[in-house]
Amino acid sequence: MSTIDAFTEAELEQLRRFPSINRAELIKHFTLTAADGQFLSRFRGQTNKLGAAVQLCTLPWLGFVPDDITTAPREAVARLSETLVIGISELGEYGDRAQTRTEHLRQIATYTNWRTLDTKGWKDLDEFLFARAMEHDSAKLLFKLGCEYLASVKTIRPGVTSLLHRVATAREAAEAETWTRVADLVTPQRAAELDSLLEVDEELKSTRLFWLSNPPTQASVQGVKTELDKLAFLRGLDAHELDLSVLPAERRRFLALRGRKPTGQQLQRREAERRYPIMLTVLSQFAIDVLDEVVSLFDQAVSGRESFARTKMNEALAERAKAGEGRQALLDELLAVLLDTDIADDEVGVYIRGEIGMERLREAHAARQARLPRDHGHLSMMDASLSYVRQFAPKVLAAVGFAAGVDAVEPLVKATAILAELYATGARKVPADAPADFVPVKWRGYLDAAAKAGDQTGYRRYWELCVLLALRDALRSGDVFVPGSRRYADPASFLLTTEAWEPLRTGFCLTTGKSPRPGRGDRGGRGRAPHRPGRPRTAPGRRRRPRAGAPGRQRRARDPASGGRVRARGGRRPPIADRSAPSADLPGRPASRDRRQDPLPRRPHPRRRESRPLTRAQAQPHLRAARRGDQYGPGDDGRLLRRLL
């Protein structure tokens, strides 16, 4: 679909008219300020004033003003009519002359600092649309992004058709730029390999592209082998080594999705400049997806056998419990005899043999069973499925590389490499230096028993199962990752490194309003230090008042004997200044304390009647004078610091 045909006729008409308005937009955009009222008073006549008000409020709302002003939302016009005390009917006569409406819009744009597109503006818009087209190819999305960009730079949106033509130009430029960036990767040999993916293979009875795009239906041995064949085929084409970082991630995702929808014949009919970038991204994406699928099928297949072994273990435990019913009944009878204090100790054995009977005792002794291991025999049940696991595990370990994400799983990764080597060479004996630290405690008894008995075969089987099960669990937790995978990638790779963060720090801080220096607080805090635990959270310059009736609250009154100083009731200590000079007034200052002589003058807050302290910068001269002792007493420095904080 071409860019011009992306919108229907009804949608194009709607883009040129007033949309519906909600309450939030009504309050935000159709509320006039005092300056707006003064500006509108310049227009002559009630009709021109109301029409200009509609244009004034519509411009920042939509980014443009529709031609027919009379179709503005009725609730918006009513709000302006009520504010200006002008009848709504006056708007019907506005705009009879198009020149009048255009001249008013020009004056409104000058007043609101909006502008029309000039040569530089068109160039900036084209560059913006081209950059977005490299990430998104949707014509509707690019049109919306273009409108948002124009509104952000206070530029009046041009006509819908003109903007759509610019979007079409940006899409074509993005396709040409894509081919320019990947043209060096399309050698004659690689072009032939890419074209072969679109041809029908006689053995598969389908194209290789269709074969690669079909995922397995179940986690079976055949499904794992099929995915391994795909992985080997892709690596034969060096798909895992394709470097498409020259294209934005969104562009690669779009091209990969675009290449999976059409058939091979549809791709063959495309021009080479469009076909090969799509095929390259599809091939690179297949290399990642198939690798993820191989590891996922390995996980599911091993988990399936483990679940089957757990089911068998539960059935065996149930049969064991049924077989032990007679022994349980015998135990209950023996406990009743042993707990009966009326039977003497030397008569217990005689009583048991006589009342219970030797025959029942012999039968219970003959039916005894071996003690279960700590896992109740789960790993031994899993051992029965080892031959099934060996049908796919050697190929998976040979084709997939594993790396340790944390130091704790280094022994497991080393054990995995040793097991892969044993599979490759066909050796049966586990090396003496093979690690076993990763084996859980519940399974360690199997290895200890086999090593103590000298059973090399049993030790190999149990150690092999422990390696495969531990590898599956580590892949799920992310402790072990697969290089080149997306689903099983290293979790640390999703984090920004220090080197990658530095170029992004300034832009991020400007966007979020944070300080680029750690510990400096946000930009809106006027240099205020971050909150420290243990201190109350109060607004800047606002003193925290104790709650009425709260512990520690006391009443204060003026003491006439102290020259108007505040004295405390309830036996609490006097203020710091009074303690420092208890019998006389502070030197260098009279007894009365008014605002002109207070050591920390206060300036009235514009929104509150009560005053607030000076800022730290404004109080620095007072602090220096207090330290010199010029005009303050010895106890005033601490009080001054308290009022600053």
Image (cartoon, grey):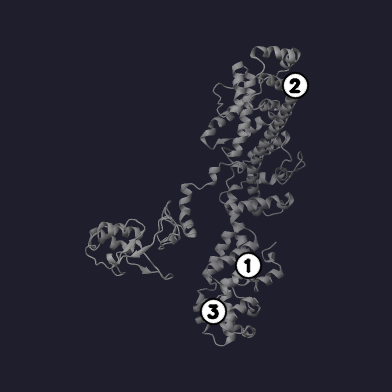
Residue for badge 2: 326
| Distance CA(mark 1)–CA(mark 2) | 89 Å
Which of the two labelled residues, at mark 1 and mark 2, occupies the earlier sequence position? Answer: 1
| Distance CA(mark 2)–CA(mark 3) | 102 Å
Report whether residue 195 is seen.
yes
Which of the two labelled residues, at mark 1 and mark 3, occupies the earlier sequence position? Answer: 3
Q: Secondary structure at mark 3?
A: helix
Amino acid type, label 3: Arg
Report whether residue 427 is seen.
no
Residue for badge 1: 165
Q: Secondary structure at mark 2?
A: helix
On screen, 159 above or below 224? below
Q: Residues within 10 Å of mark 2 (few under 14, many from 20)?
A: some
| Place of residue 611 in the rendered image (x, y in percent of width and height, measured from the top left) | 38, 68
Mark whose residue sits in front, 1 or 2: 2
| Place of residue 410 in the rendered image (x, y in percent of width and height, measured from the top left) | 53, 32
Which of the two labelled residues, at mark 2 and mark 3, occupies the earlier sequence position? Answer: 3
Label pair 1/2, CB-CB below 8 angstroms: no
On residue 559, the disc is none
| Place of residue 57 in the rendered image (x, y in percent of width and height, measured from the top left) | 57, 75
Q: Secondary structure at mark 1?
A: helix
Q: Residue at x 61, y 46 (%)?
A: 187
Mark whose residue sits in front, 2 or 3: 2
Quadrant showing the C terminus: bottom left
Residue for badge 3: 106
Amino acid type, label 1: His
Q: Residues within 10 Å of mark 1 (few under 14, many from 20)?
A: some
Q: In the figure, is residue 631 to the left or right of 232?
A: left
